[in-house]
Image (cartoon, rainbow, N blue to C red):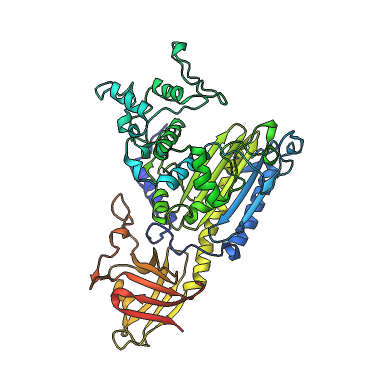
Amino acid sequence: MRLPSSRSASVALSLLLIESTLAKEYHPCSLLGPDVPIPKKVSGTFAFKDAAVSIQKAISDALSSGQTSYGTLNASATSFSLDIFSLHEEDGLFTYHYDAPGLANSTDGVKKIDSNSIYRLGSISKLLTVYTFLASVGDLSFNEPITKYIPELAAYAAQHAPSDDAIDFMDWDSITIGALASQLGGIPSMSRRSSRVPANISDAACPNFYGIPCTRAALIGSINFEHPAVAPFHGPVYSNAGFMLLQFALEKMTNASLPSLFTDKVTTPLNLSNTYFANAPLNQGVVPLNDATALRHADVVRAMLSSTLLPAPLTRRWMKPHTFTAYAATLVGAPWEIYKAPLTERDVWMYTKGGDVGAYSTNFALLPDYGIGFTVLATGGDPFQVKTIVSDIVAAIGVPAFQKAAKEEAESVYAGTYHGIDSGTAANENDVLVLTVDSNPGLLVSSWSINGTDIVSAYRAVGDQVRLNPSGLVSKKGTKEGWRVVLTEEPAVDGAFVGECVDWFDVDLAVLGGVGLDEFVISLSGDGTKAVGVEARGWRVGYERR
């Protein structure tokens, strides 16, 4: 093979660079979080109505052809349910149930799926365990070592001093409650797919086969029998065992069992009549191939989004990543599996938890930026593939639609011309502030004057655009919202440091008399459907809609 000349290589490289530059569309930076307030009536937007039709068609086409952009969909023996729901709407946004042809012949469970049918959740129980933990005792113990609450592990740690070989022995004193909750403990998986047959059979602890009981002592002995997977906090390594230990710690803290705490702290306050810690009534389950049933309900996810059981600051802490993975678009929380959403305008993250057990595969996904969640629950011959493909269809069509729906509602609420309030000081009735909603993050301040001075033009000395991002601060009555100015400028070059979004550095940067020049407050009508006034607090001026 002949190598290209240096001239040819240079030309080719130049063409590639030009192509990549042209292909990369510029979008202004924004602060992390919703770029406009969470929509209150997603179902009424044209964007979501169109998306619902598209999702329905995409799933129907996939079922009939078996072919999708994400792989082959074989649902001939797999039933599934899809629910999409909004924080602010009692009724679901979209529901789709599919009955596999053989479901009607199942000897147990339902013959036709509806919204009351119950699926097993598998590792969704990890999410519910952490939710119960937070609802019971909060997260103050997340930095405490697990040895504080499990004496058997404290004894093991004392026996195997730090001088012992870290490759062979678990460093329990370094493993915290939070590490276990976020898969950072570095402990063995305890997957039931592993054989775990010891060299000396008398050393065996827990029989690692699904459905065979295991005592607490045998479980802890089985974990300690293995070597560490990785060092604590080295990186996330998926472990079932960590959540068993988390349960023991919670029961020690509260002197109550996890099933009773789940009932008292989660299902009873939320009135989740169709959610069970153990087996559900057999006649309500979706039972393929005569399998057993346990859990199903999406309302618990809605409660997570609305901070029904947890204080809002705790919810916000919980819905944050705890660690990276080797893939930039995947992060890990406690125990969230966090994926970057398919959206070009800005970075939006989906907080998800998947679960697989027997013939069941499930996916819970929350998008806090939109107050929207969806669940995909599948059971049958190929549940994992069906769940994954349906989830991808919803994400690919739904997320851009959720963004457009939020902008559509923001257009109705905020866009318009606001006139200066004659206060006898800086502002006068000839001054205006114009808010515009476009496809880019936040609200665009397209015109803004104070005493006849064009403030937008003045800001162009340090940025191309003046945009407003919500701060997440809302008055008690809900009629006033905090916003912050974000100045955006398209970078001339791109690099690891140059050209990156650093707007979070500049919040409240310029302060006059104790008030940031970037601080805005928008006043809403009593029903929240229309912005009626804008206050540029740092500038000591106000504007009203007429």
Q: Which residue sits furthest left?
A: 513
What residue is at 38 percent from the left and 22 percent from the top? 227
Where's residue 34, x and y in %?
A: 44, 60
Closest to the observer, 500 or 280: 280
Q: Is residue 87 left or right of residue 474?
A: right
**Quadrant of res 505:** bottom left
Closest to the observer, 382 or 70: 382
Q: Is residue 231 left or right of residue 83?
A: left
Closest to the observer, 527 or 289: 527
Where's residue 491, x and y in %?
A: 32, 59
What residue is at 32 percent from the left and 41 percent from the top? 143
Residue 353 visible: yes
What residue is at 74 percent from the left and 33 percent from the top? 107
Total marks in image: 0
Where's residue 386, x and y in %?
A: 61, 40
Reply above or below: 167 against 111.
Answer: above
Reply above or below: 451 against 515.
Answer: below
What residue is at 31 percent from the left and 69 percent from the top? 518
Where's residue 252, x and y in %?
A: 40, 36
Reply above or below: 509 against 204.
Answer: below
